[in-house]
Amino acid sequence: QVPLVESGGGLVQAGGSLRLSCAASGSIFRINVMGWYRKAPGKQRELVASIINGGSTNLSESVKGRFTISRDNAKNTVYLQMNNLEPEDTAVYYCNVQGQIDFARRFVSWGQGTQVTVSS
């Protein structure tokens, strides 16, 4: 398994910004997809943003224009820059990384979750 360490959550007022980070460690041959999901109380987990090995990104409609996802391949780290935050963005954010340990073995890892709370 490939452990992930998240950081960067917290409490912010509406209109503010936060930056989440997620670093993967261990024996990694290749990382194919890195992404962020969120789970709000009473709601299903949803994909917020993802970025593939080639750099193409995918963002949910609810965060387009406000959030940006990026990755540092040298550090096996993915970032989620969240600007103009809204109370509706309040949730636990989870990092997800999919890749390969070697030619034959794939992995899917989840971060421990970080709380983002946006006050109105």
Image (cartoon, helix red, strand yellow):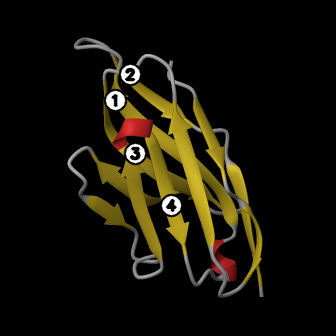
Mark 4 — residue?
80
The quadrant in which residue 9 appears is bottom right
Q: Residue at x 59, y 57 (%)?
A: 20
Quadrant (top left, top right, bottom left, bottom right) of the C terminus? bottom right
Q: Which of pointers 2 and 4 lies earlier in the amino acid sequence?
A: 2
- Identify residue type, mark 2: Ile
Q: Dots 2 and 1: beta carbons under 8 Å? A: yes
How far is the residue under mark 2 from the one under mark 4? Answer: 21 Å
Residue lying furthest front? 74
Residue 16, placed above or below residue 104: below
How far is the residue under mark 4 from the one under mark 1? Answer: 19 Å
Q: Which of pointers 2 and 1 lies earlier in the amino acid sequence?
A: 2
Q: Give the SS element for disc 3.
A: strand
Q: Which of pointers 4 and 1 lies earlier in the amino acid sequence?
A: 4
Mark 3 — residue?
34
Q: How many marks?
A: 4
Which numbered circle lies on residue 99? 1
